[in-house]
Image: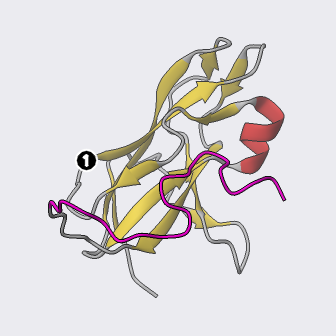
């Protein structure tokens, strides 16, 4: 299990926690002095008050919390945030209100989840031709519905 060094940038910041033994994502918590109101269609950056040292070869992927997204319409504006191994600034979550009503986030509320995952770094090179496949250039539903 990789260990992640976390620096509190504010004494009120809450370290990420897992909701259950087999949770893939660790909850990230809002750090704010007062409630944050989101108008319908509005995006705001929510502080966590944390900086992290993600190990080399890993990335921290910030995903929506299912309850917050499905029940209240609040989810990361960029769908999936990426915390790179060389980033040392504050981890913030750009939450977007997809609902038709005003939504509120309070201090200490769980706002997103962080999944730490290994990744493969690829070397890209230009080639005149690519190998043939059965699918070819078909995309966006080209393989059918069933």
145 relative position to 96: left or right = right
Q: Seen from this angle, which residue lies furthest left?
A: 126
Residue located at (55% from left, 40% from top): 30
Residue located at (52% from left, 65% from top): 115
From the top left corner, tell me how far across and down residue 22 is, in percent.
70, 79
90 relative position to 92: left or right = left
The residue nearer to you, when weighing 112 against 37, is 112
51 relative position to 75: left or right = left
Name above or below for residue 33 compared with residue 69.
Answer: above
Magenta stretch contains residue 133: yes
From the top left corner, tell me how far across and down residue 19 is, in percent.
71, 66
From the top left corner, tell me how far across and down residue 42 is, in percent.
57, 15
Neighbourhood count class around disc 1 (C-alpha, 10 Å): few under 14, some 14–19, many 20 upward? some
Q: Which residue is mark 1?
A: 89
Q: Which residues are magenta?
A: 126-146
The residue nearer to you, when weighing 15 against 131, is 131
Residue located at (65% from left, 11% from top): 39
The residue nearer to you, when weighing 65 against 12, is 65
From the top left corner, tell me how far across and down residue 56 is, in percent.
24, 75
Magenta stretch contains residue 45: no
Which element carries disc 1, helix, strand or loop?
A: loop
Residue located at (15% from left, 60% from top): 126
The quarter holding residue 55 reads bottom left
């Amino acid at each position: 299990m990789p260990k992640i060094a976390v620096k509190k940038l504010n004494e009120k910041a809450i370290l990420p926690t897992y909701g259950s033994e087999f949770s893939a994502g660790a909850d990230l918590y809002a750090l704010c002095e007062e409630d944050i109101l989101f108008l319908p269609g509005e995006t705001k950056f929510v502080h966590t008050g944390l900086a992290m040292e993600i190990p080399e070869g890993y990335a921290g992927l910030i995903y929506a919390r299912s309850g917050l997204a499905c029940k209240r319409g609040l989810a990361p504006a960029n769908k999936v945030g990426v915390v790179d191994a060389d980033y040392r600034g504050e981890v913030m979550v750009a939450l977007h209100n997809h609902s038709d009503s005003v939504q509120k986030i309070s201090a200490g509320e769980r706002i997103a989840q962080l999944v730490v995952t290994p990744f493969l770094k690829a070397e890209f090179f230009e080639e005149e031709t690519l190998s043939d496949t059965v699918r070819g250039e078909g995309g966006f539903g080209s393989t059918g519905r069933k």
